[in-house]
Image (cartoon, rainbow, N blue to C red):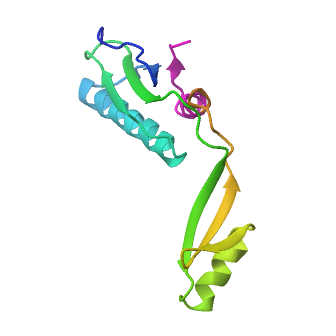
Amino acid sequence: MNSLKQKKGRALFVLQASRTKGKDDVVGSKFLKQFEQLKSGISKLDFKIISSGWHWSCEGNATFWVYLPAKPLSSKKIIEGPPINMPDVFIKQFKKKWKKVFIKNKRYIAKTKRKIILPREVIKIAASALKLKLLTK
């Protein structure tokens, strides 16, 4: 835990999960589930996790840490759709879901705007959703 350091090109986020009442094995599995949900939530928003981990000594609260790239994501996201030779049903579904559709390399492509581009924002959202306390400034 003491070896966690800010490194160039990386953003370190340390979070704390509150212990619930119960046996140690049940509490530990709840912490593990929270940690997995944290990583899953970050990944779903297109952020790449460089490194992550957690620590809990069967007493008190658990500590989670996550290293993310320090650079913000691009404001536009490219979504690959079906190839142009697919049946029209799939192409219509894709065009119905996404507004700005074009063809590139024999495939339908859509561009959309990302709502969250900063690493700090994604951590704040994930922390509040999982009721975690953000310890890093």
Left of 25 or right of it: where is 114? Answer: right
Question: Residue placed farthest to the bottom in the image?
Answer: 87
- Is residue 76 placed above or below 47 in the rendered structure? below
Left of 119 or right of it: where is 56? Answer: left
Instruction: Tell which of 10 and 103 is nearer to you.
Output: 103
Percent position of residue 72, x then y: 59, 34
Instruction: Tell which of 7 and 29 is nearer to you.
Output: 7
Residue at position x 44%, y 44% in the image:
40
Residue at position x 69%, y 56% in the image:
112
Percent position of residue 131, x then y: 54, 27
Residues drawn in magenta: 122-137
Residue at position x 59%, y 83% in the image:
90
Residue 133 in magenta?
A: yes
- Location of residue 29 (image quadrant): top left
Left of 79 or right of it: where is 51? Answer: left
Quarter of the picture holding the N terminus: top left
